Amino acid sequence: MKVIDFEQIRALNISPAQYFAWVSEMIQKKDEAILPAKLSLKPADGVFYNIMPSLLPKEKFAGVKVVTRYPERHPALDSEILLYDMHSGLPCALLDGTYITAVRTGAVAAHSVKLLANPDFQTVGFIGLGNTARAAMEMLLMLYPNKALTVKLLKYKNQHELFAARFPSEQIRYIYCDTPQAVIENSDVVLSAVTVFEEDICDPSYFKSGCLVVPIHTRGFTNCDLVFDKVYADDTAHVRGFKNFGKFRFFAEVADVVNGKAPGRENEAERILAYNIGLSIHDIYLAKKIYTVIDADGDIDLKAPKEKFWY
């Protein structure tokens, strides 16, 4: 069994475009996977162990991802992925999941924007500016390289300044905001990458007509559940326990929109929530691709030039 650490994965320099393509493939092929709802163990306030198994029969791989959160640890979130060969049932690799989790999460968030935002969106608000938000920004810039954007950042220590310095561009106008409400107001797209909110961020009236809200870690938007026109999620089983599930005006899975089984955005006035729950099938799919590359049997030409990623 191979042990594949953070530095080995980062050293591959796989481009954001490739990661986005892999995530998009797995979203489209979701129905081919066997995916139980994640098990969450919470031994203390703010601490959790999330255990996420999944099987990818057509890929002939299976895996288990474990994510832990300790508020005082840096980074607070950490994860590992155990990859199995479904032919033999033997473990193939233990991979550090930190890089994979961040890039997958960013790619899924950007996928939601591409799929569900108004095509002419111009103002994007970020709440929470860690690695997940940076990965999402990298993916958005890859998808929209020529788009003029206003990017609103919630001030936190010096993270807003570091974020803006990480993505300098003549096409981006940065606005630093003191409150979540200021980020949200008049934003076409709002991405929240904060792992814990004790209460909802603000009154739904702050969200403009036609906006898309992507709560990457799901917290802080329960009052929007009841008044937004549409709610989407990665997987029904993972949101069935939400307190407002069953009260949404409209609900569908993202994969069903991709595959033409459910409508997406139908007009420019719809306010839409896209809950990015975080599915282990995406992580296992990326882990399989990375393992295959490192095992020297992959279909990626490592001699080809690669874009520098966000670390």
Image (cartoon, rainbow, N blue to C red):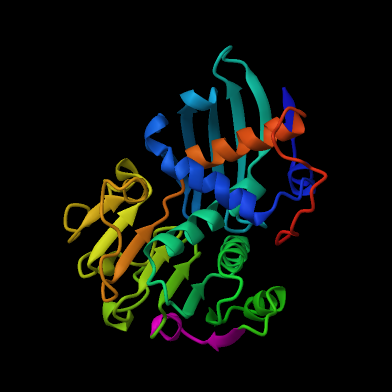
Report whether residue 69 is seen: no
244 relative to 61, above or below:
below
Q: Is residue 25 or residue 202 the one in the foreground? A: 25
Q: Is residue 269 magenta?
A: no
Residue at image location 28% in from the left, 59% down from the top: 231
Residue at image location 37% in from the left, 37% down from the top: 37
Q: Which corner quadrant of the image does residue 73 belong to?
A: bottom right
Count of all numbered marks drawn on residues in the image: 0
- Would residue 26 appear left or right of 205 to someone viewing this image? right
Quarter of the image where the C terminus is located: bottom right
Residue at image location 58% in from the left, 67% down from the top: 137
Q: Is residue 233 or residue 299 the one in the foreground? A: 299
Question: Which percent across, then down, holds residue 112?
Answer: 43, 59
Residue at image location 76% in from the left, 54% down from the top: 306
Quarter of the image where the N terminus is located: top right
Question: Which percent across, then down, holds residue 207?
Answer: 32, 79
Q: Which corner quadrant of the image does residue 88 belong to?
A: top right
Question: Which percent across, then down, holds residue 125?
Answer: 48, 77
Report whether residue 201 is seen: yes
32 relative to 179, above or below:
above
What segment is highlighted magenta in the picture?
Answer: 172-185
What residue occupies the far top of the structure in this picture?
Answer: 88
Q: Is residue 177 magenta?
A: yes
